Amino acid sequence: DQQVKQNSPSLSVQEGRISILNCDYTNSMFDYFLWYKKYPAEGPTFLISISSIKDKNEDGRFTVFLNKSAKHLSLHIVPSQPGDSAVYFCAAVTSGTYKYIFGTGTRLKVLA
Amino acid sequence: NAGVTQTPKFQVLKTGQSMTLQCAQDMNHNSMYWYRQDPGMGLRLIYYSASEGTTDKGEVPNGYNVSRLNKREFSLRLESAAPSQTSVYFCASTGQGANTEAFFGQGTRLTVV
């Protein structure tokens, strides 16, 4: 049973436009959410996170939105750059459990 | 500051062979994790260690064992490798306190033939 789902395996966006990556979760106990970026042959690197007490967190070109009632979060990248081309994973954890659960990933391709 | 270091980077095993994947972190982190990444399956948690001296099963623990040797090191052992364990394995660690980001190693690409 997949507790964290990323239903879009891939996404292509023109350079300079907005990229929107989506993530759904089923466990209502999750209270902290993270996004990671992964380049080929490298480990995932942390991008941005959000606590369940917030509905938005922004860091430069990256913004994460959380809709708790819908159990949905999204990552917005504006403007998208070719260097953003990577696989993006969302992850979720319940405080105190230390059990970080990841989604299946979305491959983003930013076209120059 | 190396972060999270995994060895080896690549390994080919024959079915039935055993091996241990090594992981060490130098960030004084309390918690450590082993994930596997497979096409279309994302990153799946195999085992984790919330603190030194404790280990717990993750989503896909069957066929694996772990040892938290000390605060720095967390190893993953395959006792009798199977082709289904062909994957890329990632070790990660998190610092103290709730809700911190995980730092990942570069991965070990394991092929079982």
Image (cartoon, coloured by chain):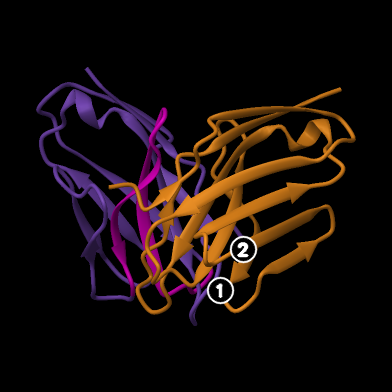
Q: CA distance from mark 1 to mark 2?
A: 7 Å
> Farthest residue in the top direction?
B113
The chain coloured orange is A
Write down the residue under mark 2: A66
Q: Nearer the viewer, residue A28 or B70?
A: A28
Q: Secondary structure at mark 1?
A: loop
Can residue B1 be found in the magenta stretch?
no
Query: In the rendered structure, are the residues bearing label 1 and label 2 in contact, judged by CB atoms less than 8 Å apart?
Result: yes
Q: Earlier in the sequence, mark 1 or mark 2?
A: 1
Q: Secondary structure at mark 2?
A: strand
Q: Which range is magenta?
A: B27-50
Task: Name the residue: 20% across, 46% down.
Answer: B77
Where residue A2 appears, x then y in whole percent?
A: 34, 47
Kind of residue at badge 1: Ser
In which quadrant of the rendered image does the C terminus of chain A lie?
top right
Query: What colour denotes chain B?
Result: purple
Can residue B31 be found in the magenta stretch?
yes
Write down the residue under mark 1: A52
Whether residue B39 is visible to the viewer of this picture, yes or no, is yes
